[in-house]
Amino acid sequence: MKKVSRRDLLKASIPTAACSLLGVPIMSTTNEDSKMKPLKKLKVVVFGAHPDDPETGCGGVMAQLANEGHEVIAAYLTRGEAGISGKTHDEAAAIRTEEALKACRILNATPKFLGQIDGDCEVTKEHYNTIHYFLKEEDPDIIFNHWPVDTHRDHRVCSILVYDAWLNLGKKQAMYYYEVMSGWQSQNFMPTNYVDITPVIKQKHNACFIHKSQKIEDDYPAYHGKMEVFRGMEFNTSYAEAFIRHVHNQRGRII
Ligand SMILES: [Zn+2]
């Protein structure tokens, strides 16, 4: 293995800010001069019920991780079929899929679609299996998931399907819940982790505002914008995203 110098270590540590803030171990060493594992490229899957949920809920972290060289996947349960009034499901799905693809390009993420229908997401054995095998196949290092206490049924469905798959596949990943429109959608969200997204705030906004069919740019200051600023105040920075880390086993050990 190539010996890694202290200079290399410092350089390698800089792009891992988001991981460090999330408490995800990314390298190990016994001391500065010993052999150490190389920086690991992480795979991250962000689950969301609709196109725009991953972007608005944790687009800042997605951008940071992808910019740092990690692989980021946006896994959308639906294509937003019911999200444009006056359009058929097929028409809306086509428009919103295209918006999701553009948003992912801005965030350097890869989009995946998981076959449920917007406004009609269900917890069924079939859908449990879909998420189970998707997660098994992707085998990420980190999962971001909807917080389950949410006024939108599709968000609750997404959260519980992902939780079930994570649980039954051995709870191998660090799993974090993100918030969307707290107060209106996410409820009782008490963060355990914060990430300063100030350096990528424009990149996040560009990805969110590309969802023109949802008029996100118009509504942003009233919802997502306030959240970013409020979480930033809590974290002593301009803009932040907040997460709840899942404590994962019976002995109470934290990932
Ligand atoms: Zn949504």
Image (tube, rainbow, N blue to C red):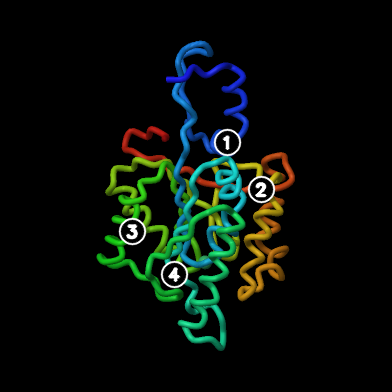
Looking at the rendered structure, the kind of residue marked 2 is Arg
For the residues marked 4 and 3, what is the alpha-carbon distance in whole angstroms?
13 Å
Across and down, in percent, residue 115 comes to 37, 69
Q: Secondary structure at mark 2?
A: helix
Q: Work out whether mark 1 precedes mark 2 in sequence or the reverse, and give the earlier one.
A: 1
Residue that badge 1 annotates: 21
Q: Are marks 4 and 2 in contact (CB under 8 Å)?
A: no
Q: Work out whether mark 1 precedes mark 4 in sequence or the reverse, and give the earlier one.
A: 1
Q: Residues within 10 Å of mark 1 (few under 14, many from 20)?
A: few
Looking at the rendered structure, the kind of residue marked 4 is Thr
For the residues marked 3 and 1, what is the alpha-carbon distance in whole angstroms?
27 Å
**Foreground label between 1 and 4:** 4
Residue at horizontal 61%, vertical 73%?
214
Looking at the rendered structure, the kind of residue marked 3 is Ile
**Foreground label between 1 and 2:** 1
Q: Work out whether mark 4 precedes mark 3 in sequence or the reverse, and give the earlier one.
A: 4
Tell me: 118 left or right of 232: left
Q: Are marks 1 and 2 in contact (CB under 8 Å)?
A: no
